[in-house]
Amino acid sequence: MQIFHVKKVALQRVMPYIIDKKFTKKQKENQMDIDGFNVYFESLRLFTFKSKGCTCASCGREGTHFRVQQNGRSIHLGLWSDDNIQMTKDHIVPKSVGGFDHIDNMQTMCAQCNNRKGSKFDENDFINGKGKYSYKEALVISKEKKMDNIFHPDNHSSDKKSRIKRELLNKYPRFEQIEEKFRIIKSQRKDPFMDVNGKDVQYVLSYLADLIKAYEGKISKRARVLRLFPKKFIQAERNKYILKEEV
C-alpha cells in the first residue's frame, strides 16, 4: 500500500536536479530532502519526464506536479496530473519484444493509456523507439510469447489449473522455497544444478515430472517453470512430453 506524504511538489523544484542514472556513482550524490524525506533523482523514469516532457504521448494529459510516495521502505517521486492520474514511463518498443531499457526507447504516458497499450505495438514504434529486433521479427516473437503459457489453452479451464497447482504444492510443500533459491542462483548467471543441494534438484525434477503428467504433456517449451533449468536439462526426455512450439 502506497502512502502519499506530500500533496504537491512543483515541477521546477525537481526538474533541475534530475540526471541520467549512468552519470552518478553513488545514490547520495543525487538526493534531496523534501519535507523530511530523502528522495533520489537518478531514475530512468524521472529522466524520461525531464527528457521527453510531462505530456502523455497518447492522450495529451499533462503531468503538473510531483508527489512524495512511500511504498514500504522505498520512497520516490511520482508525477501526477491535475485530474489525479499518475504519469509513467513507457517503453515505445515493448521490452517483451526486445525493446531497450534506455532513454531512446522511453516516452511519457499516463497510467490509463499505458495500461491500455500493454505490450501492443505497431510499425511506427520501431521508427520512434529502439530495440534488438525489427518490426517483422517482433511480430514473430510476439506470436511465440502468446504460447508462453504452462497450460494448453484448449484442454484446461482456469479451475482445473488452480486445482492441479494446489494439489502439487500440497504434495511438494518446499517447492516454492527451493524455486526461489534456484532463481537467485540463476540471477548470478550460474547453473543452479551445480549450486543447489542434490536432494533439492531431485525434488524440483520430481515436481516438474508430476506437472508434465498432470497436464498430459501439454506444456510449452517457453513455460516459466522450465526457466529454472539449464538448457542441457534432459533434452531428450523433455521432448517426449512437452508441446512442440509452432514454427
Image: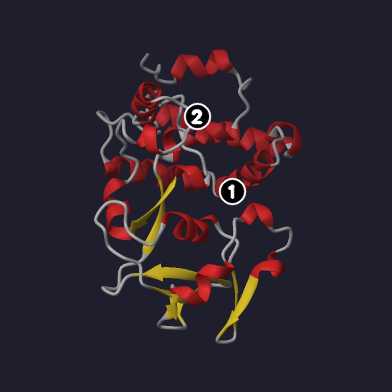
Q: Is residue 77 above or below residue 152?
A: below
Residue 152 visible to the viewer: yes
Q: Amino acid at mark 2?
A: Lys
Q: Amino acid at mark 1?
A: Arg
Q: Secondary structure at mark 2?
A: loop
For the residues labelled 2 and 1, the Cα–Cα distance comes to 38 Å
Q: Is residue 14 above or below residue 110?
A: below
Quadrant of image for the N terminus: bottom left
Q: Count the marks: how many?
A: 2
Q: Is residue 142 above or below residue 232?
A: below
Residue 71 visible to the viewer: no
Instruction: Say which of 68 and 172 sits in front.
Output: 68
Residue that mark 2 sits on = 132
Residue that mark 1 sits on = 174
Neighbor class of circle 1 (other Cα within 10 Å; few <14, some 14-19, many 20+) is few
- Going 52% across and 31% down the picture, which residue do you hit? 226
Q: Nearer the viewer, mark 2 or mark 1?
A: 2
| Quadrant hosting residue 246 | top left
Instruction: Say which of 77 and 9 sits in front.
Output: 9
> Where is residue 244 drawn, in percent x and y?
40, 16
| Quadrant hosting residue 198 | top right
Disc 2 or 1, which lies upstream in sequence?
A: 2
- Going 60% across and 61% down the picture, which residue do you hit? 42
Instruction: Say which of 2 and 37 sits in front.
Output: 37
> Where is residue 156 drawn, in percent x and y?
28, 34
- Going 45% across and 26% down the picture, which residue do you hit? 133
